[in-house]
Amino acid sequence: MELTLTTPALLFPAISLVLLAYTNRFLTLSALVRSLHSDYKKEPDPFMLVEIRSLRHRVQLLRDMQFLGVSSFLLCTICMFVLFAGQVWVGGLLFGLSLLLLICSLAISVREIQISTHALDLHLRDLENQR
């Protein structure tokens, strides 16, 4: 396979959209944490403690997702510079590493989605139990 300057540029839109999605998730989680904090201070509830643990874990996963996504973007950019400088072998190595980081970021995203849906399921069960 021939690696040209345009090859890593193909990832730019994808990585940008992934980072935008991660930012939206972060903003949503931030608002939820702040709201939950306020509610818990007013009236402590053991059910909220389960949700707090889940949110803490999700925030940590989101941090890792963002770190890997940004690192992938950075390596992709460095790869383009290295290819521009004529170092194709090093550029290929950086591009491969960039892809690997993006894969890891997306895999963590899948785990975060699983935790998120489990948390929603807990809320639905709680509603069903109140009948």
Image (cartoon, helix red, strand yellow):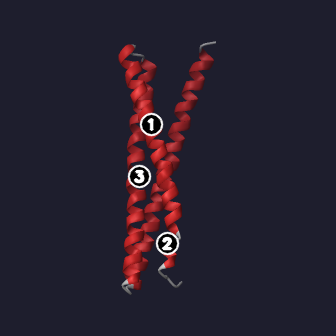
Considering depth in this image, is 63 or 110 the residue closer to the camera?
63
User: Which residue is at a point 40% across and 70% down the rendered structure image?
Assistant: 77
What residue is rendered at 37% in x and 85% in y? Answer: 87
Task: Name the residue: 42% across, 64% down.
Answer: 73
Q: Secondary structure at mark 3?
A: helix
Instruction: Name the residue carrying label 3.
Output: 66
Q: As shown in the figure, which amino acid type bears the numbered disc 1?
A: Leu
- Residue holding disc 2: 9
Q: Is residue 34 above or below residue 82?
A: above
Q: Compute the Cα span from label 2 to label 3.
A: 20 Å
Q: Amino acid at mark 3?
A: Gln
Which circle's residue, 2 or 3, is located before the other in the chain? Answer: 2
Mark 1 secondary-structure assignment = helix
Name the secondary structure under disc 2: helix
Q: Position of residue 22 (x, y in %)?
A: 47, 48
Residue 127 placement (x, y as % from top left): 59, 19
The mark that comes first in sequence, 3 or 1, is: 1
Disc 2 residue type (three-letter) = Ala
How many angstroms separate mark 1 from mark 2 (CA)? Answer: 31 Å
Q: Residue 29: which disc? A: 1
Residue 41 on image: x %, y %:
35, 18
Q: Earlier in the sequence, mark 1 or mark 2?
A: 2
**Dot 2 and dot 3 residues touching (CB under 8 Å):** no
Question: Which of the 4 image quarters holds residue 104?
Answer: bottom left
**Front position among marks 2 and 3:** 2
Give the crowd class for mark 3: few <14, some 14-19, many >=20 residues within 10 Å.
Answer: many
Residue 12: x and y in percent read: 49, 66
